[in-house]
Amino acid sequence: MIPSLPFLSASSHLSSDAPSPAPGLLIVFEGMDGSGKSTQAKRLAGRLEGRGHPVLLTREPGGTSAGKKIREILLDPDLPLDPEAELFLFEADRVMHVKTVLLPALRSGKTVLSDRGSDATVAYQSFGAGLSREFVSALNRVALGGLVPDVTFLFDLPVAEMALRLRSRGDGPTRFELLGSDYFERVREGYLELARIHEGRTVVLDATSGPDLLEEQIFGELSRRYPERFVL
Ligand SMILES: Nc1ncnc2c1ncn2[C@@H]1O[C@H](COP(=O)(O)OP(=O)(O)O)[C@@H](O)[C@H]1O
Ligand SMILES: [Mg+2]
């Protein structure tokens, strides 16, 4: 299936066959709400831009024009969604994001920082909401067309700490109380299981660390993995 899709043929970010020398790098920030992803994605983007490095900061859902509308539907508390309908919306967002944002940016050599990606869909929709793992993974494969992150930073945070942070951010406890702490415990475990399965590309961060330490850990990891690209 993958080789027959023409838009995929030129990238080394494809999991199939021998890598070709595509210049970009896909870095995905994963973890639960309040774990510090956006803070660190912005810090890394600023740091790289400050060095004249070509960077694209984007997110899922909502990284395209259609995706912004999809995100509004997904986040609207007045639009309750069946879990499968929700899954299809996340994947529709992902198709647009991969084809029109991620692949073009990677092909042009950018370092792409994505605030969430397909691991979130497995963690939330399968581990959290209980949809079949095979089903979620199959839809992810179609939407990704073989694209895999080069590095995934997982911000791991205890659920109680997450609830505290969301309250202090002013999000209110509504979403948390609606879904319940068991749901978020399953999501956290899901993320950690994915980190074990994809240990080569995943870096688990202790999200209770301070923002400055996390920033140094992230940049340090990238400069170890890609010393020519990210000089400390
Ligand atoms: N390392 C950190 N330690 C403590 N609080 C943090 C840290 N990073 C971010 N925060 C705070 O936690 C809240 C959520 O951070 P944010 O970056 O928006 O997380 P996410 O994007 O994962 O939801 C914000 O109020 C932010 O100021
Ligand atoms: Mg965020």
Image (cartoon, rainbow, N blue to C red):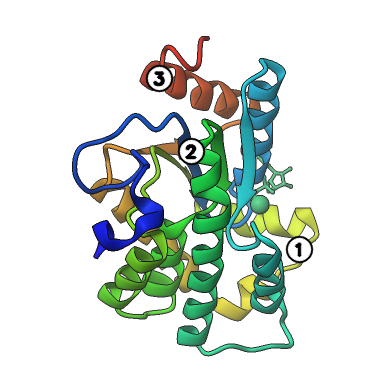
The image quadrant of residue 164 is bottom right
| First in residue order: circle 2 vs circle 3 | 2
Going by the image, does 172 lie left or right of 106? right
Tell me the element at label 1. loop
Q: Residue at x 63, y 23 (%)?
A: 48
Q: Mark 3 is on which residue type?
A: Tyr
Callout 2: 10 Å neighbours few (<14), some, many (20+)? some
- Badge number at residue 107: 2
According to the image, label 3 marks what residue?
A: 226
Q: Residue at x 46, y 60 (%)?
A: 120
Quick check: marks 1 and 3 in contact, CB under 8 Å?
Answer: no
Does residue 156 appear in the picture of this structure?
no
Callout 3: 10 Å neighbours few (<14), some, many (20+)? few
Q: Please determine whether, in this image, residue 73 is positioned above or below residue 58.
A: below
| Residue 208, image x, y percentages | 55, 39
Q: Mark 1 is on which residue type?
A: Asp
Q: Foreground residue, 119 or 169?
A: 119
Callout 1: 10 Å neighbours few (<14), some, many (20+)? few
Q: Residue at x 55, y 21 (%)?
A: 216
State which mark lies toward you, 1 or 3. Answer: 3
Going by the image, does 20 lie left or right of 85? left
Query: How far apart are labels 1 and 2 at the CA level?
Result: 37 Å
Query: How far apart are labels 1 and 3 at the CA level?
Result: 37 Å
- Badge number at residue 171: 1
Query: How far apart are labels 2 and 3 at the CA level?
Result: 18 Å
Q: Please determine whether, in this image, residue 178 is positioned above or below residue 165.
A: below
Q: Mark 2 is on which residue type?
A: Arg
Going by the image, does 187 lie left or right of 61? left
| Residue 27, image x, y percentages | 48, 39
Quadrant observed for ligand 1 in the rendered image: top right
Tell me the element at label 2. helix
| First in residue order: circle 1 vs circle 3 | 1
